[in-house]
Amino acid sequence: MDWGFDEHRRKLLGFILVGVGVVLLVAQFGGAARFLWPFFIIAPGAGLVAAALATEDATRGLAVPGMVIGTIGTILFFQNLFDHYESWAYAWALIPFAVGAGMAIASGEAPEAPGDEGARHLMTWSLAVFLALAFVFEVFIFGGSGLIGRIVIAGALILGGAAVLFTRSDAGKSDAAPAPPVDVDDRVHRAGEP
């Protein structure tokens, strides 16, 4: 169904609907107000990302701080929800992921936008570091493969899905062979021939 939005605005609408749905779902549980304070951090981040997507190229850079603020708020939400604040030992690795996601949003839909490849690399490495540290801390240091371990796996799947959402495939790139090198001496000799 075409809503008259470009791809980024359509994704933003989807994220907003999911966020509002999560807030409403959490509010259904007793004592949920104590879990909702991180949304005071998530909301400004989402507002910056929305401003970046709603405007032209001049303010697209707002997506980077918006994603960082929103990611920190989301980390705090899950830490507060499960009373697992010690996960900051590895959760910090998601902040570079947020920077990369913000860079991907800021680059727009141009296939060869500057910084797009760097954004993908930053997201990939950040996610790899997060998963490695989460495994080491949760299994060997915190000694738990119970509920928290399952939450880390679920979080890793969510982050993997976010990586798929914010990266582009390289399917449209040409695999043509590079041109052979030109011999400068050969050109000089041909130029002097009658």
Image (cartoon, helix red, strand yellow):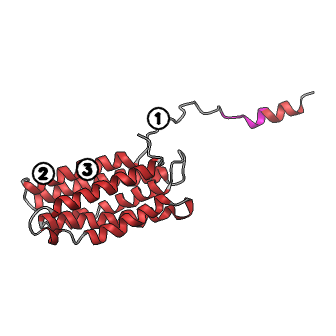
Q: Quadrant of residue 85?
A: bottom left
> Which of the image's four quarters has the C terminus?
top right
Judged from the image, the secondary structure of the residue bearing numbered disc 3 is helix
Judged from the image, the secondary structure of the residue bearing numbered disc 1 is loop
- Above or below, 86 relative to 183: below
Local packing at callout 2 (Cα closer than 10 Å; few below 14, some 14-19, many 20+) is few
Question: At 89% from the left edge and 33% from the top edge, which residue is drawn?
Answer: 192
Disc 1 marks which amino acid? Answer: Ala
The residue at which mark 2 appears reads as 150
Disc 2 marks which amino acid? Answer: Arg
In x, y percent, where is residue 181? 66, 34
Q: Which is more N-terminal, label 3 or label 1?
A: 3
Does the residue at mark 1 contact the one at mark 2 (Cβ under 8 Å)?
Answer: no
Q: CA distance from mark 2 to mark 3?
A: 12 Å
Q: Nearer the viewer, residue 148 or 70?
A: 70
Residue 158 is marked as 3
Q: CA distance from mark 1 to mark 3?
A: 24 Å
Q: Is residue 124 left or right of residue 112?
A: left
Residue 36 is marked as none
Question: At 24% from the left edge and 70% from the top edge, which residue is drawn?
Answer: 38
In x, y percent, where is residue 101? 39, 56
The residue at which mark 1 appears reads as 171
Pick out the residue farthest to the top. Answer: 194
Q: Nearer the viewer, residue 180 or 35?
A: 35
Local packing at callout 3 (Cα closer than 10 Å; few below 14, some 14-19, many 20+) is few
Question: At 45% from the left edge and 57% from the top edge, which residue is drawn?
Answer: 103
Disc 3 marks which amino acid? Answer: Ile
- Provide the residue span drawn in magenta: 181-186
Q: CA distance from mark 1 to mark 2?
A: 34 Å
